[in-house]
Amino acid sequence: LEDLKDVVIMGATNRPDIVDPALLRAGRFDRLVYIGEPTLEDRKKIIGIHTRFMPLEGSALEEIVGLCQKYNEEEIAELVEKLGKDKAVTADEVKAEITPAAEDATGISAGARRRRFIELMAEKNLTFTDPARDSLASTLAGITEGFVGSDLESVCREAGMLALRDNQTIISMKYFELAQKKVHPTMNENLRNYYNKIQQHFKGGLPKQVQPLEYQ
């Protein structure tokens, strides 16, 4: 056996009321953090994560993907390299750096181009300005109160399946609205009260200013 340094072990549960108290002793899982249901802003971010590789209607990203139709992975990497790093980038700025590929070039698939572009942008800390995607995330977040992360993931996946069944290559808002009606939200008033009681149990029902550090 040897000592481990700079190692943090985290655990998560939606049933903290049945966790063995021995696990919560000092030196074990001795810091408790309560994570409630997603807020409106949280839902926007979660939806953005689960739709980032999806072909969305009106998205500026789809225009870029189309203009790079014959690009391979290396050419997409070169394109992103030209954009710099640590800043927001518009579709017009990206288009200004796109050069025509050779006529006989064989590019990668649209899905692969989209994924490659997004992943490389993230590596460079570049934010792609895409009003249509932002609008969809905001609209969907507004009609999904009570939906937790897994629910929102299911909505996005179901929207993609519905579009595929209609032989659509682009996913419009209507498919997300249909998916939202098929997926039932996890949270309800009874469940909120249940978790609130558990939260107060671990906090001892005390204001944060006087709570023991391990229960804050």
Image (cartoon, helix red, strand yellow):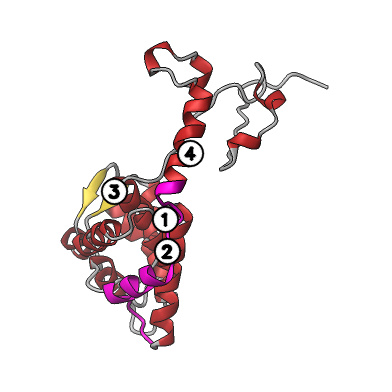
How dense is the environment of label 1, judged by Cα within 10 Å: few (below 14), some, or many (20 and up)? Answer: some
Residue 16 appears left or right of 126? right
**Dot placed on the residue nearer the N-terminal end, 4 or 2:** 2
Residue under label 3, please give it: 40
| Nearest the eye: 201 or 132 | 201
| Nearest the eye: 137 or 75 | 137
Dot 2 and dot 1 residues touching (CB under 8 Å): yes
| Residue depicted at 37% across the width and 58% down the height | 118
Q: Which residues are magenta?
A: 167-190
**Dot placed on the residue nearer the N-terminal end, 2 or 3:** 3
How dense is the environment of label 2, judged by Cα within 10 Å: few (below 14), some, or many (20 and up)? Answer: some
SS at badge 2 = helix
Residue under label 1, please give it: 119
Q: Amino acid at mark 4?
A: Tyr
Is residue 155 rendered magenta in the image? no
Nearer to us of marks 3 and 1 is: 3
Q: Quadrant of residue 68?
A: bottom left
**Dot placed on the residue nearer the N-terminal end, 4 or 1:** 1
Q: Position of residue 173 (x, y in %)?
A: 27, 72
Q: Position of residue 181 (x, y in %)?
A: 37, 71
Distance CA(mark 3)–CA(mark 1): 26 Å
Q: Amino acid at mark 2?
A: Arg
Residue under label 2, please give it: 115
Q: Quadrant of residue 92?
A: bottom left
Q: Amino acid at mark 3?
A: Leu
**Dot placed on the residue nearer the N-terminal end, 3 or 1:** 3
How dense is the environment of label 3, judged by Cα within 10 Å: few (below 14), some, or many (20 and up)? Answer: some
Nearer to us of marks 2 and 3 is: 3
Q: Quadrant of residue 117?
A: bottom left
Q: Amino acid at mark 1?
A: Glu
Residue under label 4, please give it: 195
